[in-house]
Image (cartoon, rainbow, N blue to C red):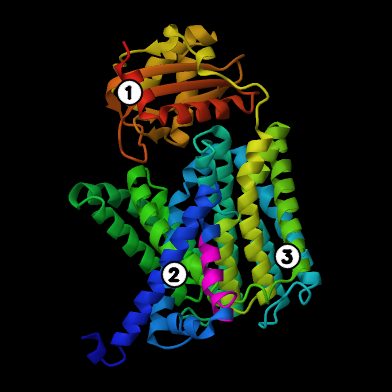
Amino acid sequence: MLSLAAGALTGPDVTVLLVSLGVLLGTARVLGECARRMRQPAVIGEMLAGVLLGPTCLGHFYPDLFHDVFPEAGAARIALDAMIVLGVLLLLLVAGLEVDLSTAVRQGKAAALVSLTGMVFPFAIGFGAAWLAPGWLGMGGHGKPLPFALFMGIALSITALPVIAKILIDLNMFRSDLGMLIVSAAMVNDLVGWLGFALVLAMISGGEGGGGSVAATMVETLVFLGLMLTVGRWLIHTSLPWIQARWSWPGGVIGFILVTTLLSAAFTEWIGVHAIFGAFIADIAIGDSSHLRERTRDTIQQFITYFFAPIFFASIGLRLNFLASFDLLIVVVVLVIALASKIGGCFLGARWAGMTRREGLAVGFGMAARGAMEIILAQLARQHDLIGDSTFVAVIIMAIVTSMISGPAMEWVLRRTQRLRLSDLFSDRTYAADLKAHDVRSAIAELALLAAPATGLTAAAIEDAVWRREQLMHTGLGDGLAVPHARLEELRKPVLVLGRSLHGVDFDAPDGRPARIIAMILTPLRDATAQLEILKILAEAFARPSIRRGVLEAA
């Protein structure tokens, strides 16, 4: 029995732990779903749950009940804190799996410019303000201006990849060229931002881990990063096919991913850098493998998003009275700097890359979302006494506000004055009732032959452009639908080619189902919104089972 073991949880401790977890998770999930219904990120509702259950509300009006359910000390509190730490690590697992370094590299100049300007401008302004006025901006009790200034620069320049990906999915933009550019730039932002924060933690810890001095910790961190993204990445990529072929699915692959994540996290914690850095880098190496199926990624994300993430985000409100620590001036300053520097920097980068004003603004608003990554960063900084409570609240509010306005602002910027209609985009001449192809490249080639007469371009040129785009990210949407697409400089108007595959073609959709309806979208390079509009129309139309069934049964 647990109660008989020395130092173990007693029966009352287990009861308190289960009650606190149940109340925390239940309230967070309910409010998270309410946020989703209002078309807002679930993290907003989950954090509100913590504010309601913490000292801000429950602890203020019913302090005895609050301390009974969420004790400040004891074995139950230690166990709850362990669950929260695990939740943070697994949240970084989700973020790391979203990163595909090869995709970012293939995006080339545009992604590099957007990422660079989107980091340099916010970092410079945040660092300068914190360096010149550390006391006013709420430097923590650690009392070192340089780490504080570095943190503020990083906090204002980092981007929340999981939140951005969710926003783009909700807007039916994730598979678009603009969506891929935003995701690729966010990948680089996250990687550089977390590397910088790892070095900040090494500076303030003073080599307290097992690795020794600060210099040694930094060297060990860089060596770990280099090895994990080269040799480690190759070993993982080589091992995944063997594991998938011989172990049970999805348990075998998920077990392998979790073991790799936990051991990497343990190593970086040991050398004096927080465990989340090791988890994040390990999962970048895992997520970069083409052998990791979308269905496996989705299974992992669903489990973590609906269990561990709500517990972590709700737990933030348990430790702080948000009303008592609210400083309006600091909140406004942090929010204005965060929005203006990020949107402005990314806009300039997009314009230098040759994008239109509307595309540049859309990229800026998309990259402005901070969300979960900012919240984790702020929580860790507060734990290390790097920032005070007022700054912590300001950064949290900034993360929430930027996540709330990002999607609506992108919709507003990219709105079309004249709505496209599917009936205007294709005819019986651009419809293949029975595709013969059994693989993605052959399906694209078959549809390119149909598209050539309608576009005035050669089938080979169309096939090459669409295939190159497909290699950046698979375009299977799920429910038997795939949308391979490309933007072509020589094209004058949008063209849609629809194909039906009776046997199905594997486009690596999140649900693992082969695509039986394949819609090839070709749009002019200079039209910033046509591709987005068509993707949205198709996603909304084919979300209805009756439409899918009608297309599959049509002669």
The percent coordinates of residue 354 (x first, y second) are 69, 32
Task: Please tell me which of labels 1 and 3 falls first in the chain.
Answer: 3
Question: CA gap, disc 1 to disc 3?
Answer: 52 Å
Q: Majority secondary structure of the magenta segment?
A: helix
Task: Please tell me which of labels 1 and 2 falls first in the chain.
Answer: 2
**For mark 3, does the 10 Å Cα neighbourhood hold few (<14), some (14 to 19), or many (20 or more) residues?**
many
Residue bearing the label numbered 1: 549
Mark 2 or 3: the one toward you: 2
Question: CA gap, disc 1 to disc 2?
Answer: 42 Å
Task: Please tell me which of labels 2 and 3 falls first in the chain.
Answer: 2
Question: CA gap, disc 2 to disc 3?
Answer: 27 Å
Query: Looking at numbered disc 1 in the image, what kind of residue is underneath it?
Result: Arg
Query: Looking at numbered disc 3 in the image, what kind of residue is underneath it?
Result: Val
**For mark 2, does the 10 Å Cα neighbourhood hold few (<14), some (14 to 19), or many (20 or more) residues?**
many
Task: Name the residue: 24% across, 55% down.
Answer: 252
Residue span colored magenta: 46-60
Q: Is residue 452 visible?
A: yes
**For mark 1, does the 10 Å Cα neighbourhood hold few (<14), some (14 to 19), or many (20 or more) residues?**
few
Residue 148 part of the magenta segment? no
Q: Mark 1 falls on what kind of element?
A: helix
The circle on residue 331 is 3
Residue bearing the label numbered 2: 24
Task: Name the residue: 50% across, 14% down.
Answer: 423
Q: Is residue 227 visible?
A: no
Task: Say whether marks 1 and 3 touch (CB < 8 Å).
Answer: no
The percent coordinates of residue 384 (x first, y second) are 58, 78
Q: Is residue 223 above or below residue 215?
A: above
